[in-house]
Amino acid sequence: MTSSQPWSYGMVALSRNEIHGKVIELAARLPRGKALDVPTGSGVLGDRLRMIGFEVSCCDIDSSYFSAPDLTLDIGDLNQSLPYPTGSFDLITCVEGIEHLENPFHAIREFSRILKPGGKLILTLPNYLNLERRLRFLVTGLFSKIPSPKKLGKDRFDHLYMLHLIPLTYPILKVMMEHSDFKILQVEKDKEKKRMKWLLPLAWMIRGYCFFWSKEKKEDYHLKDTLSDSLIMGGNTLIVVSQRE
C-alpha cells in the first residue's frame, strides 16, 4: 500500500522539520532516480523523497525508530561498508548523521563508492563555526554538549552513536569530500537565527582583523569559507550539496 500524504511520526523524528523541508526543496530540483536516506531514523525523510518521485532505500544502524509504512529498512553501519553495490544511487541524503560517526572519512568514501558518477549527495552538518558556537567554545571549551555517564545510563557505550562524537567543521568536511572525488555545489543554512544579528558587529571586527592577513594565511585558514555569511552568521546546521565527479 502506498500513501499520498505525509504520515505522522511524532516524537520519533530525529531531525527538525526545517532541515527536512530544505533538503526536500533541494532534492526536488534534481532528476528523479534511486535515492538512499542514511541514517534514516524514523524514515520520514525517506518517505518525503518517495512522495516527490524517488525510488527510495532507507538504511540505519538501529531499527527501533523506523516506522515508515511504505518503505523497508536495510541495516547498515556508516563506520563500515554499506550493504549496496558500487554505483547504486543517483542521490544520497545524510541528515544529522556524519557528526555521530567514529569514522566520518570512511562514510564519505562509502558515499562516493555507492553513488553513480554525477550523483548528488545532500549532507547536513552542525554549523560549529557560527559566532554563537565560537563564543560558546571560548567559554566552555566544547563545541556541543556531552551528557554525563549518569545521564547516558549503564548502556552508554552502546549508544555513543547518539552523541556528536567529532566536532567536524566545514573546512575539514570539504577536504574529506574533495579527497573522495566530490565537488561541493552549494552550502545552505537551515534557517535564520534572529539573535545572530546582535553579533554582527563582532563579525565585522573579525573580518576587519583578518582583512590584513596575507593571501597565503587566508588560504591556510580557509577564511573565504569560515567568514562567509552562511557559516559565521548562519544557523545551527549547514546543508551541503555536492556531486560525485
Image (cartoon, rainbow, N blue to C red):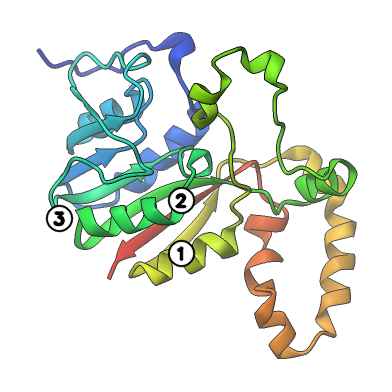
- Which residue is at a point 25% across and 52% down the rendered structure image? 30
The percent position of residue 198, horizontal first and vertical second, equals 87, 46
Locate residue 46 relative to residue 84 in the image: left or right: right
- Which residue does the numbered mark 2 point to in the structure image? 104
- Decide: few, some or many residues near mark 2? Use Cα within 10 Å; few <14, some 14-19, many ≥20: many
Cβ atoms under marks 2 and 1 closer than 8 Å: yes
The percent position of residue 77, horizontal first and vertical second, equals 33, 37
- Which residue is at a point 67% across and 50% down the rendered structure image? 234
Residue 86 got which mark? 3
Cβ atoms under marks 3 and 2 closer than 8 Å: no
- Please report whichever mark, 3 or 2, sits nearer to the chain's N-terminal start: 3
SS at mark 1 in the image: helix
Question: The residue under label 1 is which amino acid type?
Answer: Met
Toward the viewer: 79 or 100? 79
- Decide: few, some or many residues near mark 1? Use Cα within 10 Å; few <14, some 14-19, many ≥20: some
- Which residue does the numbered mark 1 point to in the structure image? 176
- Please report whichever mark, 2 or 1, sits nearer to the chain's N-terminal start: 2
- Which residue is at a point 61% across and 56% down the rendered structure image? 169
